[in-house]
Amino acid sequence: MSSISVIIPALNEEEPIVGVVREVAATKVPSEIIVVDNGSTDRTAERAREAGARVVKAPRGYGRACAAGIAALQPECDIVIFLDGDGSDCPEFMKQLVDPIATGTHDFVIGSRTRGQREPGSMNIQQLFAGRFAGWLMSILYGVPYTDMCPFRAIRETRLKSSTCASKHTAGIWRCR
């Protein structure tokens, strides 16, 4: 079985972070949960620790939080999952993200907020359009079908840190060849 780590960038997520960490742990998918506190002014870090996460700090910025989480990974990590600390992602779907990587058919799997069912009002028309447009553009640029640039994603650790996987930390996305 692969060693799986979850990185949760969080900024002022004191209220939802406990539930997010507990939901992630309840799936029994990851061997470690890292919450990256990137400048919170509330009790996000304290609450995440209380819920069982390892907490690391980073300067403000989503990309910086992702980079700090990557730097904090345990050496035995094989697969990295990213999800937001605000409770908007569904940890119960982590296994579906990880399975294609664990079986060797994929190196990178990204969730979609535009496919399937979502709560009414959870995404406004601008978010839907931007997600579709970004997905369309990524499909043209890289030849891989995307429906959305969702923050809920998983990647093989060796691809994440390889020289062929150029990190664009300011955007929190990766282009892997």
Image (spheres, grey):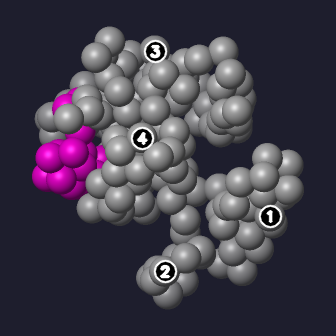
User: What kind of element bears circle 4?
Assistant: loop
Contact between labelled residues 4 and 3, with CB atoms less than 8 Å apart: no
Q: How far separated are the C-alphas under marks 2 and 4?
A: 25 Å
Query: Which residue is the site of mark 2?
Result: 116
Q: Earlier along the polypeptide chain: callout 3 or callout 4? A: 3
Q: Residue at x 46, y 83 (%)?
A: 117
Label 3: which secondary element = helix
Q: Which numbered marker is on residue 71? A: 3
The reply to whether callout 4 and callout 1 are in contact (CB within 8 Å) is: no
| Observer able to see residue 10 | no
Q: Are marks 2 and 4 in contact (CB under 8 Å)?
A: no
Query: Residue flagged by tag 1: what amino acid is it?
Result: Trp
What residue span does the magenta drawing correspond to?
17-32
Q: Nearer the viewer, residue 16 or 146?
A: 146
Nearest to viewer (mark 2 / mark 4) = 4
Check disc 1 and report the residue beneath it. Answer: 136
Task: Return the x and y of residue 60 as percentages of the image width and height.
Answer: 58, 28
Spatial CA distance of label 3 from label 1 is: 31 Å
The type of residue carrying mark 3 is Ala
Identify the residue shown where x is 46% and y is 32%. Answer: 156
